[in-house]
Amino acid sequence: MIPVPDRFLAEEIAKKARESLSTYCINTCKAQCCRKGKLLLQNEKELETIAETKKEKAFKEKILEKTPFGNYTYNLEKQSCPHLKKDWTCAIHKEERRPQICSDYPLFLVKNKFILANSCPGVRENLLTEYSKELKEKAHFKEL
């Protein structure tokens, strides 16, 4: 009999995995995910959270762009996240308005599969290996 993927357990494992990186993110990586690449914003609410009062300027300077799918990208190469503080922590980390991608990074659960973001130095240094194994063995999720 094939084991059924356990979404609740997978969410718990993913949460522990993300939390395990917090010190590493601040002290070693210096929040690269908030300074490099692109941030995918799912909707207007997330757009407002990130762009706030500078939305028009950000669109004009191509920091913000609307995708063909109706969501938005924020180019972190041109400007780091406006909520990134000088000590490499996030000003809105504990707020509900924080974009979903920020909450999920660098481990994303998609149906009964998981994705590790290779853009994360912690992932590249195998800091989430034990959690990947746990997702496979206990929650019966598969890595994409």
Image (cartoon, rainbow, N blue to C red):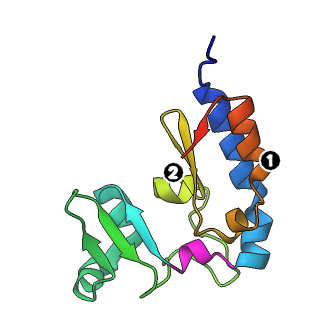
Q: In which quarter of the image is residue 78?
A: bottom left
Residue 33 left/right relative to 12: left
**Residue 127 in sight from this viewpoint:** yes
- Quarter of the image for the N terminus: give it: top right
Which numbered circle lies on residue 100? none
Mark seen at residue 130: 1
- Residue 105 spot, x, y in % from top left: 57, 58
Q: What residue type is labelled 1?
A: Glu
Q: Which of 116 and 62 is in front in this view?
A: 116
**Which numbered disc covers residue 96?**
2
**Residue 38, percent from left and from top:** 43, 73
Which residue corresponds to the image point at 28% horizontal and 84% vertical from the top-left? Answer: 62
In this picture, which residue range is highlighted in magenta?
Answer: 30-36
Q: Which residue is drawn at 65% across and 29% down?
A: 140
The answer to whether the residue labelled 1 contacts the one labelled 2, judged by CB atoms less than 8 Å apart, is no
Question: Residue 75: x and y, percent?
Answer: 39, 79
Considering the numbered disc 2 on the image, is that residue within a helix, a strand or a loop?
loop
Q: Which amino acid does label 2 sit on?
A: Glu
